[in-house]
Every structure is written in C-alpha cells, then in structure tokens.
Image: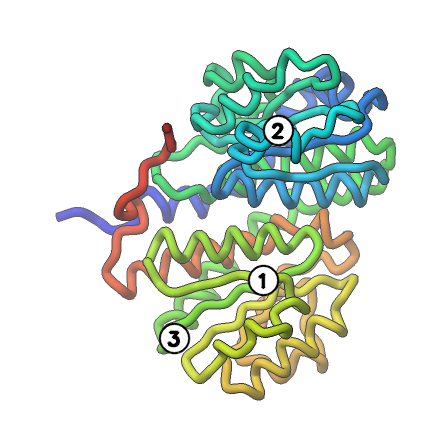
C-alpha cells in the first residue's frame, strides 16, 4: 500500500536544515555574490523562471529592489525566450538570473541560451543541482539541500528563495540585513513545527471549496506559490491576487465556504487587514499568516504567528512558507490525493 505524501511531508519538514546549509553554501560562494550582485555595471537584474520558479523570481526581484535600491524585474522564462524585444529592450545592460530547482527546465535553458551572446547581457543562475544543464551555461548559486524527490516544490522553493535573499543582503553592504537573514534561519525550525501542529486541525475541521491567497510586495510571489501548491497537491479551486487588487472585482467570488488566506505584511498591515475584514463580512473563512497577532487580527477565524516582527517583511518572508505548504499537504490527504505525484505533472518540464 502506497503511503500518501511519503516524500512531500519530510521535505517540507526539513526546510530549516536546508536554510542553514544555504548560509554555509553562501560563504563558500562569496565570489558568486561579488561577481554578479555587487557589480554595478548592470542597469537591471532580470530574474526568470517557470511555474514555482517564476514566483520565486518575483519575490527575489522585489527583495533586490528593496534592499539594493536598484532596478530588478521578473519574467516567466518563456517571455524572455519568445518575446525578447519586450523583456530586454536593447538600450539597457542586464544581468539575467535563471531560477530552476532542477536546472533542466527547457524554457529557462532556452531563454539563457538565447541571450547569453548579446553584448548587453550577462547570465547567471540559482538551482539545487550544480551539474545541471543550466548551471553549465550560467554560473550557479547552489542550494545543496534543496534537492527533492517529490514533484511539488517545497523546501527547494524555501531554500532557494532564502539563499538568494541572503546573497542580496550580503551584496547590499548592510550588516543589519545580513543579521536579519541569520535570524530568519534561526526562527525557521520552530516555525516549521508550529505550522504543522497548527494547520492539520484547521484543515480537518473546515469544509472549504474555494481557496484565495492574498499578498503584496515580496509576499505577492508567495501568494501565487501558495495558490499553486494547493492546486498541484489537491486539485482544489484556488486563485491568488495582490491584496488590495482583490477588492476590484475578484471579491465577487467570495461566499461561505471560501477560504481567504492573507499573507500579512507589516508595511501595509492596516490596509491589508481592512480587506480581510471585508471578506469576513461577506462570509469567507479568514486565515491570517503574520509576524504578530493583535487586537486588529481578532476578527479572523485563525491567525498563525511566525514571529520576527523586528525583521523586514522581505527577511521574514520564507517563514510564511511552511504553513502554506502544509496546508496543501493536509488538504490533499483529506481528499485522499497523493501530494507526491500530482496528475499530469512531472518534476522537470521539457518542451
């Protein structure tokens, strides 16, 4: 008899170890940071990826803009490959960073090959596999303990996002950001355990048929990833939006049986909570993931605290991931679906 989720569960649970190893790896690859992130010759850094890796790219670009004070963007790999004029106008100099767990995704490899010989483009990458096709053409920052057996990305997403944020913090020359990254790694183990204990009874006791994830800033990419996680693992109906954007039309889908999961920032806290409270009034079940609970979150059906309120929203972001990943995992088990092997999916997507 096959045990459902026999790979996914231990991979989610092992992400704290993967984050700690990422910090050690960053020290070993200080030359990569110097060559690609501290170099001011690029006008813009462009992060590219496909699926979950694109959502990572969005969060990486957001962190880069915030911490480096310089231009960065994120695109699906296919946009760079097939719509190069729209994504890389020739008037600027670019560093293009490919993001791929396996380093074998056809789209990201094709995109990097398509631009590597352009006079205004440099290429690099981040992956879990140092001997991958992508790493061979684009010097790679490597998350060695992000490797996974499951089709669905969990600890690889967390560790690669964290590793790139750590690299950006180092490149910024701001010691307080480096300290915050180290604090995040220290928090993560207890957050993983607490998230597991918190979300299983929540899933078991709720009857939900729509899942909506909301986030802003660096958390927007995480909201998209959370949406994809539960869709991949359990096949439920789900969407993700920028928090305030959800009020402009999409909120019409909210009704009893809808879960609205808010990834709450501190920077826009009061505005985002107004949106969540409005959705509660429409009949939604509201779950808030936050650095800290308070009187202002009392209206929610459930609040999960990750801690780290003293950290920036960017530094704290990967602490939101364990709960979101376990939410997908336990929803799949409740529906008797194997999260290790989603239908129609493979670990590496090739054209």
What residue would you read off at disc 1? Answer: 241
Residue linked to disc 2: 84
Nearest the camera: 150 or 114? 114
Q: Which residue is mark 3?
A: 208
Rounded to the nearest angstrom, the CA distance separating label 3 from label 1 is 19 Å
**1 and 2 marks in contact (CB < 8 Å):** no
Numbered-mark total: 3
x then y, percent, for residue 46: 68, 32
State the separation of the CA atoms marked 3 and 2: 42 Å
User: Is 305 positioned to the left or the right of 240 in the image?
Assistant: right
Q: Is residue 21 visible?
A: no
Q: Residue at x 56, y 35 (%)?
A: 79
Q: Identify the residue at image location x=51%, y=51%.
A: 225
Marks 1/2: CA–CA distance: 26 Å
Secondary-structure class at tag 1? strand
Compared to 303, does 191 lie above or below? Answer: above
For mark 3, does the 10 Å Cα neighbourhood hold few (<14), some (14 to 19), or many (20 or more) residues? some
Q: Residue at x 56, y 57 (%)?
A: 223
In the rendered image, is residue 84 in sight? yes
| Residue 158: quarter of image | top right
Left of 236 or right of it: where is 273? right
Query: Which-is-in-front pick, marks 3 and 2?
Result: 2
């Amino acid at each position: 008899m096959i045990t459902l989720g026999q790979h996914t569960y231990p991979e989610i649970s092992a992400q704290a170890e993967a984050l700690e190893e990422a910090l050690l790896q960053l020290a070993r690859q200080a030359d990569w940071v110097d060559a690609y992130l501290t170099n001011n010759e690029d006008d813009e850094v462009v992060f590219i990826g496909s699926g979950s890796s694109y959502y990572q790219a969005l969060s990486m670009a957001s962190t880069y803009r915030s911490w480096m004070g310089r231009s960065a963007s994120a695109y699906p790999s296919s946009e760079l490959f097939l719509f190069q004029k729209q994504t890389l106008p020739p008037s600027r100099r670019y560093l293009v960073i490919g993001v791929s767990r396996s380093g074998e995704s056809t789209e990201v490899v094709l995109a990097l090959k398509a631009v590597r010989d352009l006079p205004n483009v440099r290429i690099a990458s981040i992956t879990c596999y140092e001997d991958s096709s992508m790493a061979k053409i684009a010097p790679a920052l490597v998350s060695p303990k992000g490797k996974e057996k499951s089709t669905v990305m969990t600890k690889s997403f967390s560790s690669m996002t964290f590793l790139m944020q750590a690299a950006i913090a180092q490149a910024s020359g701001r010691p307080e950001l480096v300290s915050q990254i180290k604090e995040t790694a220290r928090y993560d183990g207890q957050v993983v355990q607490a998230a597991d204990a918190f979300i299983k009874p929540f899933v078991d006791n709720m009857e939900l048929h729509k899942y909506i994830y909301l986030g802003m800033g660096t958390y927007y990419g995480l909201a998209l990833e959370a949406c994809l996680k539960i869709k991949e693992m359990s096949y439920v109906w789900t969407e993700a939006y920028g928090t305030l954007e959800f009020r402009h039309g999409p909120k019409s889908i909210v009704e009893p049986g809808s879960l609205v999961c808010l990834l709450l920032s501190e920077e826009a806290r009061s505005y985002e909570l107004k949106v969540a409270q409005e959705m509660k009034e429409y009949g939604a079940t509201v779950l808030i993931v936050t650095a800290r609970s308070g009187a202002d979150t009392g209206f929610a059906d459930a609040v999960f605290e990750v801690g780290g309120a003293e950290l920036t929203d960017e530094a704290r972001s990967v602490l939101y991931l364990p709960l979101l990943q376990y939410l997908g995992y336990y929803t799949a088990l409740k529906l008797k679906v194997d999260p290790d092997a989603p239908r129609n999916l493979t670990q590496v997507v090739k054209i």
